[in-house]
Image (cartoon, helix red, strand yellow):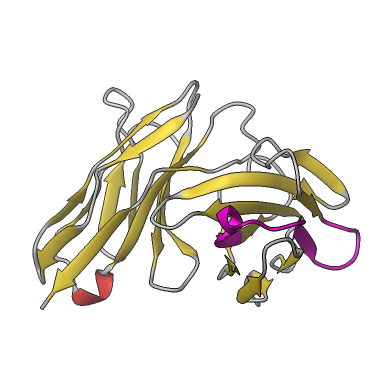
Amino acid sequence: NAGVMQNPRHLVRRRGQEARLRCSPMKGHSHVYWYRQLPEEGLKFMVYLQKENIIDESGMPKERFSAEFPKEGPSILRIQQVVRGDSAAYFCASSPPGQPTYEQYFGPGTRLTVT
Amino acid sequence: GDSVTQMEGPVTLSEEAFLTINCTYTATGYPSLFWYVQYPGEGLQLLLKATKADDKGSNKGFEATYRKETTSFHLEKGSVQVSDSAVYFCALIPGSGGYNKLIFGAGTRLAVHP
């Protein structure tokens, strides 16, 4: 059973460009979470999605960031007009359906560098 | 709001030394508590967990006990190995209305020398 897949693993963007980060959850998992890790810091929650629904986006910056988890295909975290401060590692996690679900399985992350 | 505080690193130990990484939390209700480990260049792996007071989580020689009276979840290992060198994160999921949102501490880097 494949784990959580993220791509690309490394992404370089110039200021003002768009970044698209993809996450494929583990098979059978319907909950997806995105976290951001700034250099030398812990992970910060960004958004929690189920298929076609955003459940909690309390950690998402109000502008330029959006996330989706369509009925088919991977979850996408989109950052428009990137700035240097967006440089970070972005991790996706997934968990199986049902409550409570205590365990989240993390992907290897996408390291975004904005030049 | 809910939060997690861990001891600052780096922690540097010799092989076979005893390890303690302190973790305390602030939360309403009854959170679930976790330790995650991150090896260089990789994502996080769940190391152990405890979902109610007095539970002890254990895995790969690591242990942590959920202490509600002291709001703590300290990580311990009796004899560390070089391969344990990594960053360790304490985390919680709030006990009510948290939608499984993990709240992490800042992480503690462990370096084990031969």
Q: Range of the magenta residues? A: A69-91
Determine the residue positioned at 30% across, 31% down: B67
Which residue is rendered at x = 24% and y = 62% of the image? Answer: B110
Q: Residue at x 61, y 41 (%)?
A: B100
> Which residue is more in the foreground, B64 or A23?
A23
Residue A32 occupies which quadrant of the picture?
bottom right
Place of residue A109 in the rendered image (x, y in percent of width and height, measured from the top left): 57, 67
Q: Where, quadrant-wise, is the C terminus of chain A in this rendering? A: bottom right
Q: Quadrant of residue B58?
A: bottom left
> In the depicted view, which residue is nearer to us: A102 or A17?
A17
Q: Is residue A56 left or right of residue B52?
A: right
Q: Quadrant of the N terminus of chain A?
A: bottom right
The image shows residue A49 at horizontal and vertical percentages of: 76, 48
Q: Is residue B84 magenta?
A: no
Residue B93: image x %, image y %? 52, 38
Is residue A35 shown left or right of residue B37?
A: right
**In the image, residue B22 above or below residue A12:** above
B89 to the left or right of B62: right
